[in-house]
Image (tube, rainbow, N blue to C red):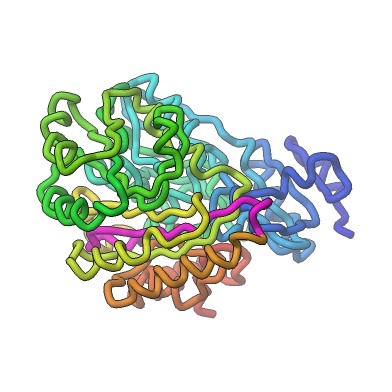
Amino acid sequence: MVPVNDFRETLRGTLVQPHDKGYHEARAVWNGTIDRHPAVITKCAGTADVIAAVKFAREHDLEIAVRGGGHNVAGTAVCDDGIVIDLSEMRAVWVDPRARTARVQGGSLWSDVDHETQAHSLATTGGIVSHTGVAGLTLGGGIGWLMRKHGLTADNLLSADVVTADGEFIRASDDEHSDLFWALRGGGGNFGIVTSFEFALHSVGSTVLAGPMFWAANDTADVLRFYRDFARDAPDELGTVIRFGTIPPLSAVPEELHWRSAVAINACYAGPVDEGERVLRPLRGHGTPLLDLVSPKPYLAHQGGLDSTVLHGWHYYWKSTDLPELSDDLIDVFVDHAFSAESPRSYSVLFHLGGAVSRVDDDATAYTGRNSPHNININGVWRLDEEERYAESETTWTRRFFDALEPHREGVYVNFLDADDGTQRVRESYGEYTYRRLAEIKTEYDPHNVFHLNQNIEPTV
């Protein structure tokens, strides 16, 4: 039994234990396959609560899990028997429109950031799903619609407030604790608990030309070969994500197309709408699309457009890898595997990187995927009531598709590692030089590996 009475009195937030109402809701995370039972959940109201929770956990030798948005597929935001330091009620966002910066609390979601920054027609690179947490996305690198124009989320990080493994509060930036600041931009949650982030913002109008185009699955090879040449010359303003799977039953989709197998290219042009119309015209005119939903729309609407296709509580099993340009052999792998899942909810997404992402020096941050043109994320998905029907088939499909990509693999994005991706894949995500440097910084700030429930980088001693 964890002695929490005195600890509870030190908090401005709330403390939840297994016998308390709301415990099961508090321990649930986005990925429904995660079913862990912490001894105590501390819903922090501010940085002081985070400091108190770290010190309490260290005093009583409790394993620590840190929850921001709780969106990580590996489920590391919750643990068995230990303490969850939960920042999900720390979601304030302060925007300075003149300086074009935003200060964002560590429990914020991207919908929180977008809502506040778009009031000033500003934005920074966020995820492609608006209920993704800011902290996890940023600390792993941060790929999203605006990355080719404005860089990764981590590239837009100006400073971070951090609670260390000793319960100390420090600020990391280019001028303060610069080694830690380097590590935070890609090294994940290994080095401390970030209670707030300061981001650079960019002028992104309230309206963007954006949306998906769908072609029949049988047209995949032809569409990808055309896209290969189209994307090679695309301007930085154009962000595209290819989705392989079935067409979700969205309100904008005619009912006769619901759940039909298709390849979709989802686009967002971060520039004037008339320029975007010109840039996208060749792609929109290629072949015979089943449906074209590209149109001028609020940036906020586009940011949340995929939210209903990846709901909280569904069961997810992922594999991911960085990929080179789309050779004919690689395209054949997509054709052979992308549409063979049994669950209609399973899908794969192929991100187009490059642009501003590739123009940052390799050693400027801990993120190491800058030289790869693409990243693919293979997602086996099913609901709890479909567990018996789909769990085995979708896990097998995901692994089989991933194995078929072996000849083309170039690395891995750490945010897309699943729970069963071991230490070797963490090393693969960084490479030996960057991993060794991260391990040295880990040794300085967390020598006892207090923060190990993550894609862990072990200290050198």
The residue lying at 72 percent from left, 59 percent from top is: 36
Toward the viewer: 5 or 301? 301
Toward the viewer: 191 or 176? 191
Q: Is residue 109 above or below residue 227?
A: above
Residue 380 counted in the magenta span: yes
Instruction: Give the quarter of the image for residue 88.
Output: top right
Say which quadrant the C terminus sits in: bottom right
From where the camera sits, is residue 273 visible?
yes
Say which quadrant the N terminus sits in: bottom right
The residue lying at 38 percent from left, 69 percent from top is: 429
Start-end of magenta stretch? 366-387
Residue 375 counted in the magenta span: yes
Q: Is residue 180 above or below residue 268?
A: below
Q: Is residue 64 left or right of residue 281?
A: right
Q: Is residue 197 above or below residue 351?
A: above
Q: Is residue 89 left or right of residue 266?
A: right
The residue lying at 21 percent from left, 70 percent from top is: 329
How many marks the image carries: the answer is 0
Toward the viewer: 327 or 78? 327
The residue lying at 35 percent from left, 27 percent from top is: 299
Residue 129 is situated, as x and y percent measured from the top left of the image, at 45, 41
Residue 112 is situated, as x and y percent measured from the top left of the image, at 49, 31
